[in-house]
Image (cartoon, rainbow, N blue to C red):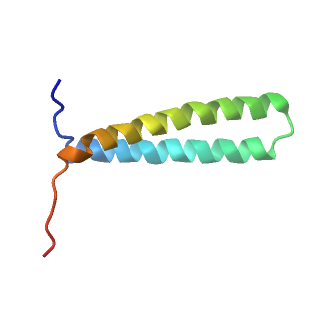
Amino acid sequence: MMMEPISTKELEYVTDSMSNEDLIIKQCATLAASTQQHATHSLCMDIINAHNQHYNILMQTLHQHLPMAPTQNFN
């Protein structure tokens, strides 16, 4: 199966999604570190793990498309 190059707009969507996933991870980590309730801490850790997986999938997508990215010569 031949992969098509990722468009600029799609690249923006992927990077925005990665930023959103990172923000969710950080917010949940802050809550997990500050709570005394085991159930809340456990839920936060589950959410962190899920969003880490999402982030990694998005990163893999970028790496898969890297060989097709245009190169620029700045000379």
User: Picture quarter containing residue 10?
Assistant: top left
Query: Where is residue 35 shown, x and y percent of the image?
Result: 82, 41
Q: In the picture, residue 7 is in which quadrant? A: top left
The spot of residue 12 in percent (x, y) is: 30, 47
Front-lying residue, 11 or 3? 3
Q: Name which residue lies at 71% across and 48% down.
A: 30
Query: Which residue is located at x 69 percent, y 34 percent?
Result: 45
From the viewer's perspective, is residue 47 above or below residue 1? below
Task: Point out the residue furthest to the right here.
Answer: 36
Residue 41's spot in the image, x, y percent? Answer: 77, 35
Instruction: Find residue 37 and report its image quarter.
Output: top right
- Residue at 40 percent across and 42 percent down: it is 59
Against 33, residue 1 (above or below) is above
Specify the quadrant that holds the C terminus: bottom left
Identify which residue is drawn at 66% across, 41% down.
28
> Total marks drawn?
0
Taking the image as shown, residue 41 lies to the left or right of residue 61, namely: right
Which residue is the extreme one toward the top? 1
Left or right: residue 29 compared with residue 14: right
| Drawn side of residue 1 relative to residue 52, left or right | left
- Which residue is at the front of the view, 40 or 1? 1
Rendered-image quadrant of the N terminus? top left
